[in-house]
Amino acid sequence: QVQLAESGGGLVQPGGSLRLSCVASGIAFRLSAMGWYRQAPGKERELVARISASYTTIYADSVKGRFTISRDNAKNTVYLQMNSLKPEDTAVYYCNYYGNWGQGTQVTVSS
């Protein structure tokens, strides 16, 4: 059974940073691509970043240069380091593994 558990969200001021974590179980993590998505109120869920098993990364244009996705295969964990946060980054952030989703973690950027 695939389980994805996100953590690390919270309230942060504009310009601040957060690091999200997603611990995966029930999958061959080191062989798997993993992704972070987000969904803001009234909007569709969108891809934020993705990392392949070979550590190739892709990012949404809106987060390039500010967010970094990484993985630790020894811990079955994928991270999303978010810097220079903006109010428009406010959303629920979800970890993704091939159609499987975690419960999400709320990120709110506000002064």
Image (tube, rainbow, N blue to C red):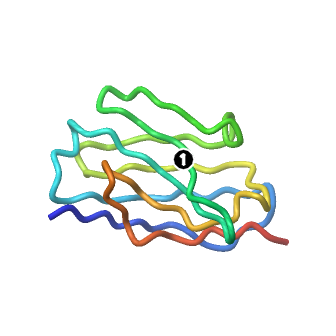
Dot 1, how many residues are within 10 Å of its Cα: few (below 14), some (14-19), or many (20+)?
some
Q: Residue at x 41, y 36 (%)?
A: 51
Instruction: Locate residue 75 relative to residue 44 in the image: left or right.
Output: left
The amino acid type, in three-letter code, at marker 1 is Leu
Rendering coords of residue 109 (x, y %) = 74, 66
Instruction: Locate residue 69 relative to residue 5 in the image: left or right.
Output: right
Q: In terms of depth relative to the viewer, which is nearer, 20 or 105?
A: 105
Quarter of the picture containing the N terminus is bottom left
Q: Residue at x 22, y 45 (%)?
A: 29
Q: Residue at x 68, y 36 (%)?
A: 61
Q: Which residue is mark 1?
A: 47
Rendering coords of residue 93 (x, y %) = 53, 62
Rendering coords of residue 92 (x, y %) = 57, 67
Quarter-wise, where is residue 85 in the image? bottom right
Residue farthest right in this picture = 111
Rendering coords of residue 59 (x, y %) = 57, 36
Q: Residue at x 64, y 66 (%)?
A: 91
